[in-house]
Amino acid sequence: MFSKLFKTNSENETEEVDLDENKIPNHIAIIMDGNGRWAQKRRLPRVAGHKQGMENVKEITKAASNLGVKVLTLYAFSTENWKRPKSEVSFLMDLPSKFFDTFVPELIENNVKVNVMGYTDQLPEKTQKAVFDAIEQTKNCTGMILNFALNYGGRAEIVTGVKKIAEKVQNNELAADEIDEETIRKSLMTASVYPYDDPDLLIRTSGEERISNFLLWQLAYSEMVFTDTFWPDYSQADLAEDISKFQQRNRRFGGLNEGDKK
């Protein structure tokens, strides 16, 4: 029932992290923040942080898969990230091809399926090719879904979903009074990872405590953990510790659990 993982504390001592295997979150979403600051702290160019951050995606993906997570959604590039310097954006657009070239065999070995959500048609051709090749190569995997939010924005996603619904109403495929939460759920980009559309746990690294236009509808009842660790330093033990925090939360979804009614 319980699995033990190990974490080194600030005094460089090893601590055990106990996880209840029956309470592993089905869907974990991560805002992978702090790559640039990690690099600057080491007097390296910001892109070095992005490169190291992408390497860390491999470690955390395998750790999440081994723990039994069903969906791991990673905020890789937002619709607002185009505002960054052109050289940095260009580097970020090159990363998927380098990443998948080396990682797809490991993904297949670990039975991990790649998915992407976002406005991929706006990405450079080489980026699109790298992403869709990885999706095709892992399509027969039946384990964890590695879901990249790439050129994704929560508000834009909702606007796009509303337009889809409006079009159905206009075409007499749907009556206005038939629109409910399920209608909206199906119109969002996370419909592709049903039935695990809504993350159970959101993790944001680097000390920032905001959701930055990420999964605005889906995070309604997600548990949130904010850690000071920069993403390139975020370890498998950190993931285990954050899952342990999740397992200690009392999730009531607006109601009361049996123990709270007494």
Image (tube, grey):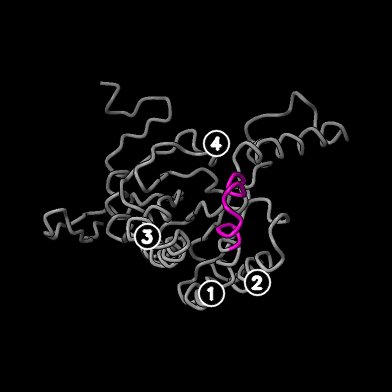
The location of residue 96, given as percent across then percent down, is: 57, 67
Q: Secondary structure at mark 4?
A: loop
Tell me the number on the disc at residue 216: 4
Q: Secondary structure at mark 3?
A: helix
Q: Which mark's residue is nearer the viewer, 3 or 4?
A: 3
Graded by Cα atoms within 10 Å as few (under 14), some (14 to 19) or many (20 or more), the crowding at tag 3 reads many
The location of residue 182, given as percent across then percent down, is: 64, 36
Is 84 in the magenta? yes
Q: What's under tag 4, amino acid-wise?
A: Leu
Q: Secondary structure at mark 2?
A: helix
Is 5 in the magenta? no
Task: Please name the residue shown 59% across and 67% down the image.
Answer: 94
Q: Which numbered disc flags the more N-terminal residue, 3 or 1?
A: 1
Q: Which numbered disc flags the more N-terminal residue, 4 or 1?
A: 1
Rendered-image quadrant of the N terminus: bottom left
Q: Which residue is mark 2?
A: 133
Q: Which numbered disc flags the more N-terminal residue, 3 or 4?
A: 4
Q: Place residue 128 in its image quadrant.
A: bottom right
